[in-house]
Image (tube, helix red, strand yellow):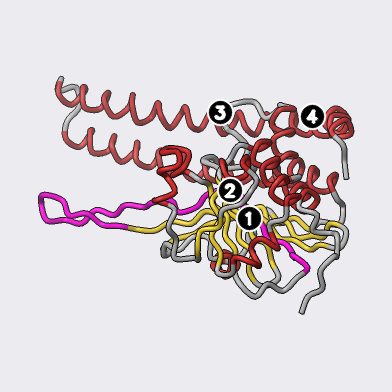
């Protein structure tokens, strides 16, 4: 796998020039955005002013509005076309190259994601899903361990009634971030769940009273640093302690400290599932700032390396157990 120094060399020799080539396309998108804003905030008020001052009549303002609307439609179509073109070229020229540099055997598809079934198989989130999206699917193997991961976003819908008797629709995020699962090299009879310990963090030891879960009994472990960050529930306490060895608990604390994002983890069947929450889109180019940035490359590299970090830190390649 590529080192940080090799990543810097890759950026200097290849990625930087590709990003510079993409800058003109990004700037064209920006021009369309500014033109769209100018059309709305300048032409509409101008037409109304001319009509009020009786400089144009009803026919004139109608034709003017039609012309402005046609212009907005044309700008919108061009904007969508340019954004899609910029995104696709960025993914192919930059993001795919980072994945290939980490491991040329990994398969990357920016228009695909994990399946909703995989998300449900993890049983990490019990809220019904009314809508979901995802992209940047990576499938591969690290040593003996296969994995799949992608960006994923699930939502549920609620309704409220307005004063005039109408119905207003509201969408709420269940999970948004990086979703990952890998072979755990042992078929697990029970189910073990690890979640951020928000209750104890907020309320101290009294927070334990709010740690009830339908996913099993609360498991208290001896690693104090782990206990500060996570809460564990399992259907089989003996198996949960068998899975959560001191090394795995230390590894999860280390991963949490490195990425500083909420993590949900489950051990079910023969897989370990991990959902790392982010509020932003992870591998998308930013239209409003220059894409020529090594910091952006480092961020993507660290996110893609999370697959390797989880597998290596949790020692998943050590086949000390046998699947049954």
- Helix, strand or loop at label 4? It is helix
Q: Which mark is residue 16?
A: 4
Secondary structure mainly formed by the magenta segment: strand
**How far apart, in angstroms, are the residues tagged by discs 2 and 1?**
7 Å
Magenta span: 158-185
- As drawn, the residue found furthest toward the top would be 53
Crowdedness near tag 2: few (<14), some (14–19) or many (≥20) residues, C-alpha within 10 Å: many
- Tell whether label 2 touches label 4 (CB within 8 Å): no
Q: Quadrant of residue 16?
A: top right
In this figure, which residue is indicated by the disc labeled 2?
Answer: 263
Mark 4 or 3, nearer chain start: 4
Residue 246 located left or right of residue 36? right
Point out residue 90 in the picture as x, y percentages from the top left corner: 70, 41
- Nearer the observer: mark 4 or 2; the answer is 2
Q: Residue at x 55, y 69 (%)?
A: 235
Residue 65 located left or right of residue 278? left
- Nearer the observer: mark 4 or 1; the answer is 1
- Helix, strand or loop at label 2? It is strand
- Tell whether label 1 touches label 2 (CB within 8 Å): yes
Mark 1 or 3, nearer chain start: 1
Q: Quadrant of residue 199?
A: top left
**Residue 288 visible in rendering:** yes
Q: Residue at x 40, y 29 (%)?
A: 37
In this figure, which residue is indicated by the disc labeled 3?
Answer: 288
For the N terminus, the image quarter is: top right
- Tell whether label 3 touches label 4 (CB within 8 Å): no
- Helix, strand or loop at label 3? It is loop
Q: Which mark is residue 274?
A: 1
């Amino acid at each position: 796998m590529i080192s940080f120094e090799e990543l810097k060399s890759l950026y200097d020799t290849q990625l930087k020039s590709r990003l510079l080539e993409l800058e003109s396309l990004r700037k064209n998108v920006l021009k369309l955005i500014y033109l769209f804003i100018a059309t709305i905030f300048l032409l509409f008020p101008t037409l109304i002013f001319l009509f009020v001052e009786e400089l144009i009549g009803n026919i004139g303002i109608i034709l003017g509005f039609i012309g402005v609307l046609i212009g907005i439609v044309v700008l919108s179509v061009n904007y969508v076309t340019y954004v899609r073109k910029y995104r696709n070229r960025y993914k192919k020229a930059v993001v795919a190259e980072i994945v290939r540099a980490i491991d040329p055997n990994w398969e990357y598809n920016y228009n695909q994601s994990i399946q909703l079934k995989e998300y449900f198989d993890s049983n990490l989130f019990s809220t019904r899903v009314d809508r979901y999206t995802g992209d940047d699917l990576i499938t591969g193997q690290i040593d003996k361990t296969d994995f799949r991961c992608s960006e994923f976003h699930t939502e549920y819908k609620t309704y409220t009634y307005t004063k005039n008797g109408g119905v207003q629709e509201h969408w709420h995020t269940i999970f948004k971030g990086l979703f990952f699962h890998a072979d755990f090299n042992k078929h697990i009879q029970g189910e073990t769940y690890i979640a951020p310990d928000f209750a104890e963090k907020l309320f101290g030891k009294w927070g334990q009273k709010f740690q009830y879960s339908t996913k099993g009994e609360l498991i208290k472990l001896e690693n104090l640093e782990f206990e500060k960050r996570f809460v564990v529930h399992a259907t089989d306490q003996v198996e949960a302690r068998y899975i959560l060895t001191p090394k795995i608990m230390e590894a999860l604390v280390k991963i949490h400290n490195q990425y500083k994002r909420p993590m949900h983890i489950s051990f079910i069947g023969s897989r370990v599932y991990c959902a790392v929450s982010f509020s932003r889109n992870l591998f998308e180019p930013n239209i409003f700032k220059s894409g020529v940035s090594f910091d952006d490359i480092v961020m993507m590299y660290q996110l893609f390396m999370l697959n390797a970090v989880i597998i290596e830190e949790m020692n998943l390649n050590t086949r000390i157990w046998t699947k049954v």
